[in-house]
Amino acid sequence: MLRSLYSAVSGLNIHQTEMDVIGNNLANINTNGYKSQATNFSDILYQSKSNASGPTDARGSINPIQIGLGGRVAAIDTNITTQGSAVTTNAPFNMMITGDSFFIVTDGTNRYYTRDGDFFVDGEINEIGNSDDDEGYLVTSSLGYYVLGWQSDDGATVNTDGAIGKIMLLGPDVHDSPGEATTYITVKGNVDKNDSAIYTSLGHGVTAAALLPGEDGYESYNLNFSLTDADDEDSTTYLLTLTQVTDSSGNSVDFDKQEIELTYSPSDGTLTSAETGVITVNGVGITIDVSKTTNYNTSGTTTLRTTRGDADGGGEGQEDGTMSGITVSKDGKIYAKYTNGDTRLLAQMATATFINATGLVNEGNNLYSASNASGDPNIAPVDEDGGYITTGVLEASNVDMSDEFTRMITAQRAFQANSRVITTSDTMLSELRSLKSS
């Protein structure tokens, strides 16, 4: 009789534990990145009334007679591999991982792993130039733990095989994008032999824009050229002469007069010499590429035009700029954007995967830590495991409310049934006691 009482008590305990787990799931139904848990049960010891026996010549085998002694909680599993839905926030540093990876954060001593991508930068863009070492890092919003990744040393690449560390996004080293002088100008179009302007002393005017060092950094300048017939009888040779340099206010700037001679083939109008020339302005050598020009008779109008840079945009130059924003790509690379159009790679976020992610230890605050069951983390960029990062969204809890309510009903009925076993066993004990008293 007592066995049924103790078995029922164990049933009450385990189903109370299940209700605790269900209650925690429902309490965290709106917790970012929360992973639901489920309670699994198993039976425990059995008391054998008789052992099993094998068959003999006289009789067959006899099965064992055993009475169970209740149940126990075998495991509380975390449904860690099921993706939560995306919740749009439009915050630039709210991030969601699609895939099985975890963000890596640290409190300065210990490393933790999280699916909660609610981050922010502990500093303001208008204070980028400060020297406070505690500002400018990417951190978690709830605890201020540092997010870990690989910092870029050259603004273009990261070494993902190196050690991970705190991600600095704001600071004096990345506040400014230094200007660069224009070192290449491409000239395209056609030199028309019938263009009357070519045969005057002023020639056909050609203007090129360039960025050159000035008093306040790199400034815009106009380089004015004249195209003339080179004062000879050959209709296939011309001179491209730098005649004037002006700053952005239209003021003339001192320069050395320089000429580039162009010679074209009389048969097909292609350039045969002076494919490039170099002029010097404000101490900067600028390559003038005229290899794309031609020499044909058309409408009597020369159509030369210029662009800064070569065919690949090299040598275009840029003005001085300051940081205007930060973006995060799907592979976790973080870029700074500048007012001069420059883009610089600041860092790449590191993520971790585990052989057995369900073996991670819940530490609270949406954090997990590694354990012997989970194995050591494999630290790599998020796209190495086929995942990607989306910004402006957060991963919601993966709690299924309908499933939780269903399990709540079954747990409640099981609790009631075990309670009834206790009351019924008590009634039977009362009957036994009454036999003695009678």
Image (tube, rainbow, N blue to C red):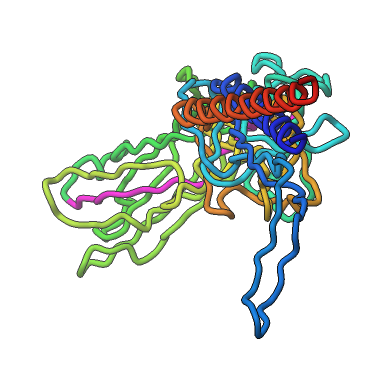
Q: Is residue 159 visible?
A: no
Left or right placement of residue 432 versus residue 118 in this view: right
Tell me the magenta residue range: 173-193
Residue 55 figure quarter: bottom right
Q: Is residue 270 visible?
A: yes
Q: Position of residue 56 (x, y in %)?
A: 68, 82
Left or right placement of residue 369 versus residue 298 in this view: right
**Residue under the point 67% across and 47% down:** 357
Give the number of marks: 0
As drawn, the residue found furthest toward the front would be 438
Q: Nearer the viewer, residue 225 or 72?
A: 72
Left or right placement of residue 258 versus residue 292 in this view: right
Q: Position of residue 172 (x, y in %)?
A: 75, 26
**Residue under the point 69% across and 32% down:** 8
Left or right placement of residue 373 versus residue 226 in this view: right
Q: Position of residue 174 (x, y in %)?
A: 69, 30
As drawn, the residue found furthest toward the left would be 299
**Residue under the point 73% across and 30% down:** 9
Q: Position of residue 131 (x, y in %)?
A: 82, 20
When the figure is inspected, residue 258 is found, relative to residue 112, above or below; the finding is below
- Magenta span has 192? yes
Q: Nearer the viewer, residue 306 or 234?
A: 306
- Magenta span has 180? yes
When the figure is inspected, residue 292 is found, relative to residue 112, above or below; the finding is below
